[in-house]
Amino acid sequence: MKTLYIDCGMGAAGDMLTAALLELLPDPDAFIKRMDSLGIPGVEISREKACKCGITGTHVTVRVNGEEEGEHLNHHDNDHEHEHGHGHEHEHNHEHEHDHDHHHEHAHSSMKDIEELIASLELPQKVREDALAVYRLIAEAESVCHGRPVEQIHFHEVGSIDAVADVTAVCLLMHELAPDEVIVSPVHVGSGHVRCAHGILPVPAPATAYILRGVPIYGGGIKGELCTPTGAALLKHFADRFGDMPVMSASAIGYGMGKKDFPAANCVRAMIGESGGLTDEVLELSCNVDDMTAEAIGFACERLFEGGAREVYTVPIGMKKSRPGTLIRVMCGREDRDMMLGLLFKHTTTIGVREAVTRRYVLERRVETLETDDGEVRLKISSGYGTTRRKYEYDDLARIAREKDISLREAEELIEER
Amino acid sequence: MAERASIESQLGSAPCEVGDDENIFLLRESDDYQSRLLLGNALCSQYRFREAIEAYRSAELIRGDDPALYIRLGGAYLTVRKFDRAEAAYRRALSLGVPESGVGYQRGFRLYLLGDFEEAEKQFRKCLPCGGELEIAVIYWRCLCRMRLTGAPQQPEGFRQDMEVGHHTAYKRAAELFAGMRSPEETLSGLEAERGGLDYVIPAYGLCRLMVCSGEAGKGRELLEKVLLRREVWPSLPYLAAWNDKNG
């Protein structure tokens, strides 16, 4: 399976994601040319090598009418200090220190403006749809945060032309890379406060926090806005799931560098390659009981399966006071935990449930249906980790065995012969 | 709450009674290099040089290859009279490609405070030719160095009446004084009307040194005390030099 893993240990922004994905392409310059020819008004994209904490990657710059976003930010250390460059004679200092971090200030655009602009670009339909879906996530977040309908939302950071370029670039890169699965690490959003057009806001900014609902995020030890609304929306839209890096064999690794320098390398890392199989996370919920009948235990297991448990099994155990007991173990996804806990407490006599989070390595599975003289037979094919296994569906074999009054093994041989 | 830190809080053990403004609060809220550098600059603007050094040092932990950082750090160290550390910072800036002329002024002033006027003069000379507004300040300090070396009044070498000095008119007045184009009395009376701290301390310190060299040490000391009353510009070079002359 072609897997793209995005490491957001230093957050994510549109330009960082663009740069990281760009490094995965065999011909990044061709992509830049394509972006420049799309017709986003006044936009010119360039890439250059950048180094953070000794790691070399790519920094992408979007210039709109020749000006880079936040370019004015660099004026704070102007040359007016000349002789006073060591902090003396301050009355002559004219540092523009208050100009920092105004990166939310832009010309405003409405969602309609954005839709029209994206619709006008020469892009594959899927890319257009993705770009619009990303913007809808942002629009919804802005709408909720500002308490206004989406139609009345005027984008600032995300509405500017350079952000359109970032979103479009990432959508187009995803289209070109065409991963089967996108896995994103928990997102480091940073902490502290940031000044924006509306005043001083906590980090993550409200729109970012809203977009990342349901996504594993953390503040970490670094102060600063590490994840922008644009970055958050792109991750949310494209991620099939969030979690640790799977077992995979990477064929290309890209580092997309941010503008700022932090104590840790300020980059998004993207890795693309083949995952040998799937990994996921399962919860194991366990309880020991010594006062339930076999019938009651059986009924509880049935109810747990019906409730969505991936697996339920029991183990005979010896408990205190030499009592024979039963360990009941339920395997489920995080999303089913509360449901399973409810069922365990309802249908067993336990007064406590243990939980263990475990990682599960699984083979990729698919089912093919074979047409035979004895009807349809489903063939389950499992592959990954260098192994491929095939197995006929038991129910289908059993049906044929009953119909022909033969054994299961004979039914399987019959299908194999045909 | 004071707007700027006192000299006692930076050179002595008095408490610093300056709080963070909104800008500094926000700069403390981001751990990126630029914010830490700007934090140091903002703290310098409030004369909180000790804290500025901490900010610059934390910036250095992120990026140790920016010569501008070391020039700033050197300046903060110099202001709080950590002379060896200031020199180390300037040397680091030099190693990162800053030309000698880029830190000659600062290193010259450091040597001036240390009393090595011969080497100080050499360092100031390294800034030349610099043209523009800085040149008049270099002329001023070089002239003072030579006065200290010889114990006699000196001509401000390189000074021309028509040179471009920009807003450095106070240095020009001092240079005119050194060149004999302006009398000490005229300078003194001009100082009495002077409201701006910098515009006062620059010519006043020059006149003070000239008086000492001219056999009027008593008057010079009296004027030095007046310079030290201009506490609002205590981190300025002439003020620090005056403070050093008295306490160093």
Image: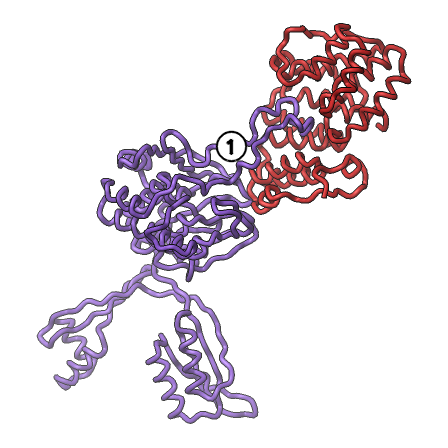
In the image, the chain rendered in red is B
Quadrant (top left/top right/bottom left/bottom right) for the C terminus of chain B: top right
The kind of secondary structure element at disc 1 is: helix
Residue A212, image x, y percentages: 42, 57
Q: Is residue B45 visible?
A: yes
User: Which chain corresponds to the colour purple?
Assistant: A
Measured as percent of width and height from the top left, residue B242 is found at 81, 24
Q: Describe residue A120's horizontal placement relative to residue A187 as left or right.
A: left
Few, some or many residues within 10 Å of mark 1 (<14, 14–19, 20+): few
Residue at image point 35% right, 79% down: A307
Quadrant in which residue B134 is drawn: top right
Question: Residue at 41% of width from left, 66% of height from top?
Answer: A281
Which amino acid, mark 1? Asn
Query: In x, y percent, where is residue B36?
Result: 60, 40
Q: In the depicted view, which residue is nearer to us: A305 or A165?
A: A165
Residue sitting at x 37%, y 59% = A241
Considering depth in this image, is A206 or A263 the residue closer to the camera?
A206
Residue B196 appears left or right of A55: right
Count the numbered circles shown: 1
Instruction: Give the vertical position of B109 relative to B164 (above or below).
Output: below
- Residue labelled with disc 1: A74
Q: Quadrant of residue B207?
A: top right
x, y percent for residue A117: 27, 42
Front position in the image: A27 or A128:
A128
In the displayed image of the protein, which residue is found farthest to the front? B193
Give the colouring mode of the picture.
by chain
Residue A253 seen: no
